[in-house]
Image (tube, rainbow, N blue to C red):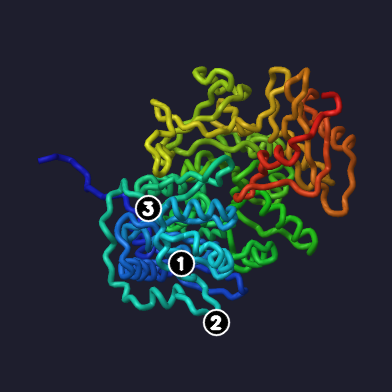
């Protein structure tokens, strides 16, 4: 007999929704739909509908391990599917509707999805792709219009009584699969386990991360179809928070919801906040008074961080990727925070934060990957990560994506500071090497968008016979604004090293983006493949 042992409690996602329904049954879940209507439910309702959905999936003949795809925005019914699919032993595959058609064709077939549940707004995609998805047996619409001859979600689960016992899956079984955006080659599948998802969500509750409590009201702008919505639905359920979802990302809608529903926290990419700034300025209104704004996906420019902080909002830079579930680091006050000036606080907030417990980071030399770099705040190298919610192997591959010590090469270039703060400086494929020295394209871009006439900027390295590469800055002007190349360079002159200054500034109508909203340097290089510097 074992003395002093603890109970054997399998770490399954079903425990999360059971807890939310038991401890915070009446906490609201609000949805603003694409047609402008709003619905309200609560954690007890999500729990009930998830059980009905699990029954409905079994009635379709689905079994443990089967994949259920969603093509949907943020709303309560999508949230139901996160728990209903996992509860019957299935794997939810959240599809990014912004992917190209050939990518959508590939990921649904590669995942072997048997059911597709989608928003009515994506009916044109469904109609176009049906013949290309031979393995999908059932199509169900989350929000069917009045004139609809298919299967609607509410009617579908409404046929069940909800008397369902969650399937006792192993904690190492998969519960969700997300695909990378596929900037090179086909997108790659990343399967999240019940165990890794639970650990990731628990870590996300830390004060140094999302800092959720029962009083939190979260409006996540980061989509539920991308990297598990940064784990927010799971962490939010654990804390029993109020969720406010919007199926549209119109800044007027978001502003109204934030103010009317008492939103305390939000999370999204920098372009979301830029759009909100422009809306508020055009209307002459104040920004919502949030406790915390989490910004990820790409680095936020300084003026954005300053404006939010001056509005009384704790700004949290976050870094991660699909392969890390996705939280790797989150920014927040450090031990010396109260001793820093406002400018110093902004300086620190511009970095990507510190690893939460469960994550380990290191950087290695870009030219010699066997050399681990010091955490000195100046050495820049390839960023590696390991931990219990970090990818080991991509879906349907035999080869590990990590080295013998468990380190995963993120593809990012970063600096680690003595206090644990991590600072992304570039992607390994985007960093510019000029005369044997490295130039950060990200820092150049962030400095450039501080110019009052610059809406967006992207820097890439162009061939130079003497220096190997020199930076060229591509700039989109703000509507109605004017500036010259010389003015942009002069603006940058006291913000970056002199030898970092771009050899040319080219004004363009637009800058290409990936399906997840990041600047696509690959497409930019392809677009300007014939470009030559004046002295090259």
Q: Nearer the viewer, residue 484 or 294?
A: 484
Residue 169 x, y percent position in the rendering:
28, 53
Q: Is residue 126 above or below residue 389?
A: below
* Mark 2 element type: loop
- Which mark is on residue 146? 2
Q: Which residue is mark 3?
A: 175
Residue 93 x, y percent position in the rendering:
44, 55
Q: Is residue 135 visible in this depiction of the protein?
A: yes
Distance Cα–Cα, label 1 vs label 2: 30 Å
Residue 232 x, y percent position in the rendering:
49, 53
Query: Is 82 left, or right, of 283 in this rendering?
Result: left
* Mark 1 element type: loop
Image depth: mark 2 or mark 3 in front: 2
Q: Which residue is mark 1?
A: 27
Query: Is 240 left, or right, of 4 in this rendering?
Result: right
Residue 149 x, y percent position in the rendering:
49, 79
Quadrant location, the C terminus: top right
Q: What residue do we see at 53% from left, 67% from top?
A: 119
Q: What residue do we see at 62% from left, 31% from top?
A: 429
Q: Quadrant of residue 419?
A: top right
Q: Residues within 10 Å of mark 2 (few under 14, many from 20)?
A: few
Do callouts 1 and 3 mark residues in contact (Cβ within 8 Å)?
A: no
Q: What residue do we see at 83% from left, 43% from top?
A: 507
Do callouts 1 and 2 mark residues in contact (Cβ within 8 Å)?
A: no
Distance Cα–Cα, label 2 vs label 3: 33 Å
Q: Name the residue furthest left.
A: 1
Q: Earlier in the sequence, mark 1 or mark 3?
A: 1
Q: Quadrant of residue 396?
A: top left
Q: Residues within 10 Å of mark 1 (few under 14, many from 20)?
A: many
Q: Earlier in the sequence, mark 2 or mark 3?
A: 2
Q: Nearer the viewer, residue 166 or 348?
A: 166
């Amino acid at each position: 007999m074992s003395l002093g042992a603890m109970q054997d409690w399998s770490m399954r996602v079903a425990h999360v929704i059971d807890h939310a329904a038991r401890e915070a049954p009446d906490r609201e879940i609000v949805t603003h739909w694409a047609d402008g209507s709003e619905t309200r439910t609560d954690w007890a309702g999500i729990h009930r509908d998830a059980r009905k959905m699990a029954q409905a999936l079994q009635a379709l003949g689905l079994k443990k391990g089967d994949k259920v795809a969603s093509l949907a925005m943020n709303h309560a019914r999508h949230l139901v599917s996160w728990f209903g699919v996992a509860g019957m032993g299935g794997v939810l595959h959240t599809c990014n509707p912004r992917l190209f058609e050939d990518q959508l064709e590939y990921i649904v077939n590669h995942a072997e999805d048997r059911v597709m549940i989608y928003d009515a707004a994506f009916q044109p995609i469904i109609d176009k792709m049906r013949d290309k998805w031979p393995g999908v047996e059932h199509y169900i619409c989350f929000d069917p219009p009045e004139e609809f001859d298919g299967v609607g979600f509410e009617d579908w689960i409404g046929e069940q009584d909800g008397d369902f016992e969650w399937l006792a899956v192993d904690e190492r079984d998969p519960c969700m699969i997300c695909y990378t955006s596929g900037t090179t080659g086909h997108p790659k599948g990343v399967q999240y386990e019940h165990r890794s998802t639970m650990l990731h969500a628990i870590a996300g509750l830390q004060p140094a991360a999302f800092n959720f409590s029962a009083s939190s009201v979260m409006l996540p702008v980061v989509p539920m179809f991308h990297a598990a919505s940064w784990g927010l639905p799971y962490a939010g359920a654990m804390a029993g928070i109020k969720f406010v979802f919007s199926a549209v990302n119109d800044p007027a809608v978001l502003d109204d919801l934030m103010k009317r529903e008492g939103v305390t926290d939000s999370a999204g990419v920098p372009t979301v906040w830029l759009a909100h700034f422009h809306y508020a300025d055009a209307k002459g209104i104040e920004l919502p008074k949030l406790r915390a704004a989490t910004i990820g996906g790409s680095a936020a420019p300084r003026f954005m961080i300053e404006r939010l902080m001056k509005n009384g909002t704790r700004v949290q830079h976050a870094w991660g990727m699909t392969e890390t579930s996705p939280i790797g680091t989150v920014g927040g006050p450090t031990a010396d925070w109260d001793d820093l000036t406002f400018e110093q606080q902004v300086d620190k907030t511009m970095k990507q934060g510190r690893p939460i417990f469960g994550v380990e980071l290191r950087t290695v030399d870009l030219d010699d990957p066997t050399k681990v770099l010091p955490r000195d705040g100046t050495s820049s190298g390839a960023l590696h990560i390991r931990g219990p919610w970090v990818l080991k192997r991509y879906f349907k591959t035999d080869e590990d994506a990590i080295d013998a010590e468990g380190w995963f090469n993120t593809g990012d270039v970063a600096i680690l500071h003595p206090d644990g703060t991590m600072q992304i400086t570039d992607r390994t494929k985007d960093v510019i090497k000029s005369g044997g020295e490295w130039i950060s394209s990200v820092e150049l871009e962030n400095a450039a968008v501080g110019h009052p006439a610059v809406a967006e900027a992207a820097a890439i390295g162009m061939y130079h016979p003497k220096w190997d590469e020199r930076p060229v800055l591509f700039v989109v002007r703000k509507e109605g604004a004017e500036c010259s190349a010389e003015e942009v360079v002069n603006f940058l002159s006291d913000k970056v090293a002199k030898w970092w200054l771009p050899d040319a500034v080219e004004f363009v109508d637009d800058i290409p983006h990936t399906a997840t909203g990041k600047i696509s340097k690959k497409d930019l290089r392809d677009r300007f493949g014939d470009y030559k510097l004046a002295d090259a």
